[in-house]
Image: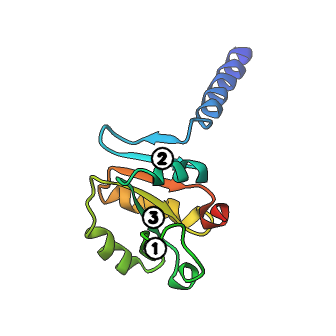
Amino acid sequence: MKNYIIITLFFILHTFACNTNKPHNLETSNTQKLENITVSQVKEMMNNQKYTIIDVRTPEETALGKISNTALEINVLNKDIFMQEIAKLDKSKPYIIYCRSGSRSKSACQIMQQEGFSHLYNMLGGYNAWQ
């Protein structure tokens, strides 16, 4: 009996540990997609005009440079303005989101996903990785 419990616990722990190594593409439903992408993937995607790039850093940070002159600047740290600005966007279009290092863009993607955006791409490493 004791061996059975140990084996069962091992199986459960092993199953959960294996599930944490899923690929970056996270399907949340049939209509929503959140994907972590690398800088090189963003560079490839930028050739396709159907993506809108959103820089969620502060105005002081964006003044130091952006990855694209066409990137929208929506500071995620100012929650009220962020919510107002994303409400103006088409939720069915794809968006590439980036910040300084990747943390705020992940948060921004999660907020946008909760607001019903269907195709979001979080750039890993942010502007630091871009440079």
Task: Tell me which corner region of the image, top left, top right, bottom left or bottom right, holds residue 61.
Answer: bottom right
Q: Quadrant of the N terminus?
A: top right
Q: Quadrant of the C terminus?
A: bottom right
Closest to the camera, between mark 3 and mark 2, is: 2
Task: Tell me which corner region of the image, top left, top right, bottom left or bottom right, holds residue 75.
Answer: bottom left
Q: Say which mark, if any, is on residue 76.
A: 1
Q: Is residue 25 left or right of residue 2?
A: left
Q: Residues within 10 Å of mark 2 (few under 14, many from 20)?
A: some
Which secondary structure, mark 1? loop
Disc 3 + disc 1, Cβ < 8 Å: yes
Residue 31 is situated, as x and y percent measured from the top left of the image, at 29, 42
Answer with mark 1 or mark 2, whichever residue precedes in sequence. 2
| Mark pair 1, 2: CA separation | 19 Å
Task: Tell me which corner region of the image, top left, top right, bottom left or bottom right, holds residue 117.
Answer: bottom left
Disc 1 + disc 2, Cβ < 8 Å: no
Which secondary structure, mark 2? strand
Question: What residue lies at 59% left-to-right and 61% top-to-bottom?
Answer: 102
Residue linked to disc 3: 108
| Mark pair 3, 2: CA separation | 13 Å
Question: What residue lies at 52% left-to-right and 80% top-to-bottom?
Answer: 58
Q: Type of residue at label 3? A: Ala
Q: Type of residue at label 1? A: Val
Q: Is residue 69 left or right of residue 87?
A: right
Q: Type of residue at label 2? A: Glu
Which secondary structure, mark 3? helix
Farthest residue, direction front: 47
Residue linked to disc 2: 35
